[in-house]
Amino acid sequence: MHVLTLFYDAHCGVCSRFRRWMLEQPAYVRLNFVPYDSPQALRLCPDLRHLRADEEIVVMGDDGSLWQGAAAWVTCLWALRDYREWSLRLATPGMLGLARKVVHWISSNRISLSALLRLKGDDALRAEVGAVACENGACALKP
């Protein structure tokens, strides 16, 4: 496997922060992030609308393999150089149950967590960055 495509919620602060964190990590494979509700997502994975991608992250391998929920999180960790060992631990039968509970809790509370932690989704951040005042060659966010 050479590429993982992660379908995520670009409106969610937790999801968007996770995307940025993953991109900062050294990875064994190329990581593509696509908002789950975009036309591109449906072109890449027509079955996405049936996978509850609005509730849990969905990851697709370049071979067409799909993972969702805890398995998707474990796959994300597997892709990262510094976290592959953790992914192998979490994939064991004894740990996968715990991973499922944690991932389900985060997924179920991600919008509240985003608000609590003041994390903005990619869409909100793009809107803020797009709202810049540029005068005399110097640009800044509008107050």
Image (cartoon, grey):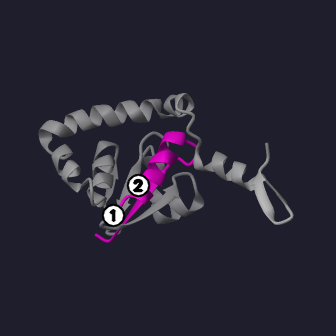
Q: Is residue 129 magenta?
A: no
- The residue lying furthest to the right in this view is 136
Q: Amino acid at mark 2?
A: Met
* Secondary structure of residue under mark 2: helix
Q: Residue 57, image x and y in percent?
A: 41, 47
| Count of labels in the image | 2
129 over 108 or under it: above or below: below
Q: Residue 38, image x and y in percent?
A: 58, 56
Of 117 and 51, which appears nearest the observer?
117
Q: Residue 86, image x and y in percent?
A: 21, 48
Stretch of the chain drawn in magenta: 1-25
82 over 94 or under it: above or below: below
Q: Residue at x 41, y 55 (%)?
A: 22
Question: Which residue matches tag 2?
Answer: 22
Q: Quadrant of the C terminus?
A: top right
In the picture provided, is 87 more to the left or to the right than 20?
left
Q: Quadrant of the N terminus?
A: bottom left
72 over 136 or under it: above or below: above
Q: Residues within 10 Å of mark 2 (few under 14, many from 20)?
A: some
Q: Amino acid at mark 1?
A: Ala
Q: Residue at x 79, y 47 (%)?
A: 142
In the picture provided, is 68 more to the left or to the right than 141?
left
- Point out which mark residue 115 bears: none
Q: CA distance from mark 2 to mark 1?
A: 8 Å
